[in-house]
Amino acid sequence: MEDVSEDVFNLSVEDQDQQVESSSDDNSVDSAAEDSSEGEDPELDHVQGSSEDSDWEPGDPQHKRPRMTPTRSTGPSQPPPSTSGFTPRRGKGRSHRGRRKAAASAPASTNSSTPGWHSMNDEDVDPPSLPFKPKRKPGPQIVSTASYTPMELFQLFFTSTMLKTVLNNSNAYGAIRQTQKPWQDINLKDLYSFLAIVIYTGLVKCSSLSDYWRASRLYSLPLPTEIMARRKFLNILAVLHPSDPKVDAENDEKKGTPAYDRLCKIKPLYEQILEACKSNFHPFQSIAVDERMAKSKARCSSKHCVKNKPRKWGYKLFVLADSSSGYTWNFFVYDGKSAVEQGQGLSYDSVMKLVEQNVLGTGYKLFVDNFYTSPTLFKDLHQKKILACGTIRPVVIGLPNTAVNTMPRNAPRGTMEWIRQNELLFVRWMDTREVVMCSTMHKAYEGDTVNRRVKGADGQWTIAKVPIPAAVKDYKKSMGGADISDALISYYNIIHKTRKWYKKLFYHFVDIAIVNAFILHCHISREKQQKQLTQKDFRERLVLQLIDCTVEADGAGSSASAPASGAEASTPFSACGAEPLPFHKPQYIQGDSTVGRRRCTHCQQKTPVMCVSCQVSLCFVPKRDCFNQWHDANGL
């Protein structure tokens, strides 16, 4: 055996090539036997020179060359295998997953059909452009030259018809719920007063609802007491019901079947406010889709958890918002159903449901985060003439995974690479960490730069301009549309704990209506070059106007689309079916500060001022503010 092994190792390259040719020409066992009779081992010759199976090529790192250490045979000698059609046997422990890992770790061939990554200096083609053709003129769909009060803008979303529906259903539910004594129906004025207190709780925070009616020195809030008694407010809160109780009972009988509607209790209000959001505003070219959480920790199957949100627990809504203003144009409440309409997954179907091409138009630029981005979604949107851009996860199917010309992990800031596949552009950009983008509207690099802190060779940090892809720049600018709306809601949102999930969504719908009305006010003020109200001032004026809302004798509200008669938005409405609440204003007794002075009721000194409502003389000077002190002491 030692002589045979030495003969094998001393073969020249030419001899090995001759053996390969002879083995490929002879397709019988006799030819292999003849080769073995000349002192050559056909099995070893096959290992060294056979090219029948590509898995045994010398360049393949998956298979190692077998060791040629001579072994002692203890059994009968086996006949040599045929070199014709020989297929080597794979190792016993070799799995398909292991072969895939080995193939992924192997260096990619430069002759691969998938193109490699291009650098920043490589010129990219211009993406196909789509003309912007909206169905309506972008912006508010109301008379921009007219003056609107906060109440009138709010009524564009919470219309009188919608409030009447809530009122009738709440009275019907109260009659069913209260069995010990007859239920006293509430009217539209009571519902407006209830909404005023609910919005007021977002401006003035208390730990408990009963604290708003406490008469102690720590609280002493006069407004809730003037609007409505505490017991009446709690009664309305207990029977608040947006849907018809009879419809709810019919829907409960369908529980466990496909016909069961989990959102039945908010459907009337849900559908009407959604239609109002679409009709009163049309988005500009840049729009964004994101999820929103209505904060709640109630024990309900419709509650979800999103870890990367400020409010992790609550009811999830998918929202389409205008990127420039944050206006909530379209949304739907996620009810937790696993079945989807298109069968492409939740992220795909939610975008397709929100982007209504027949209502929006074509040429829109949609921005989404990595939860929604996929090549399949972007291609289908492009067929509908909707451009898209967003971050993409590295594990998404369709993302190029070629390792040709890829940038290293420790690449400096500003390093970028890109690959284009027809209308799809994939960009990798190194910032603090790697950012991967997919877009159908951008070129790879358009010369944009951004300031970043860069560590020099001496270890000092300096501000330097680094290149940034256009896709990343526009994404950072336009993706925050839904975040703007979330921030405006979170500043003065109605935080009220409740065990009823539909009441929580009712409060969230009120917040959406207020924020959308405030955004309309900002648009109108900019067009008329007038000073804008802050959201706090807007809500404060809305509370006062809800208290003194205009209601017809039969209970119908004033038209929400009619412009205000006065120029100022702070003018309150007339009485809402009853006498208006008194306003305590100081006034001179005789029209002159030196004539007709009387004794102050509070300090007994002379004063020319009296309260219009109380008809009480009170001092109203910087050193003696008896006017406010006396009213506070009497709870007025």
Image (tube, rainbow, N blue to C red):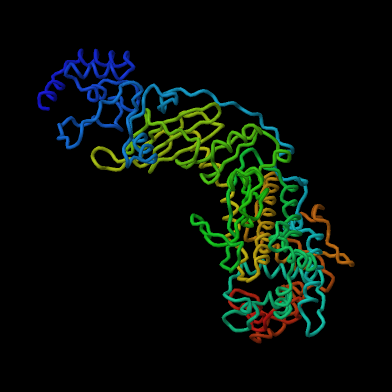
Residue 257 vs 27, above or below: the answer is below
Nearer to us in this view, 586 or 204: 204
**Extreme residue in the right direction:** 554
Report the number of numbered marks.
Answer: 0
Residue 104, above or below 485 = above
Q: Is residue 545 visible?
A: no
* Residue 344 left/right relative to 226: left
* Location of residue 551 in the rendering, given as x and y in whole percent from the top left corner: 84, 65
622 over 147 or under it: above or below: below
Q: Identify the residue shown where x is 68% and y is 60%.
A: 262
Residue 407 position by quadrant: top left
Q: Which residue occupies the foreground of this view, 416 or 379?
A: 379
Q: Position of residue 117 (x, y in %)?
A: 41, 28
Q: Quadrant of the C terminus?
A: bottom right
In which image quadrant can residue 15 be found? top left
Q: Nearer the viewer, residue 520 or 164?
A: 164
Q: Residue at point 70% right, 47% down?
A: 524
Looking at this view, name the residue that lies furthest to the front. Answer: 76
- The quarter of the image holding the N terminus is top left
Q: Position of residue 522 (x, y in %)?
A: 66, 50
User: Is residue 576 rendered to the left or right of residue 339?
Assistant: right
Q: Quadrant of residue 133?
A: top right
Q: Tell me if residue 38 can be seen.
A: yes
Question: Seen from this angle, which residue lies furthest left?
Answer: 3
**Rendered position, 349 above or below 405:** below
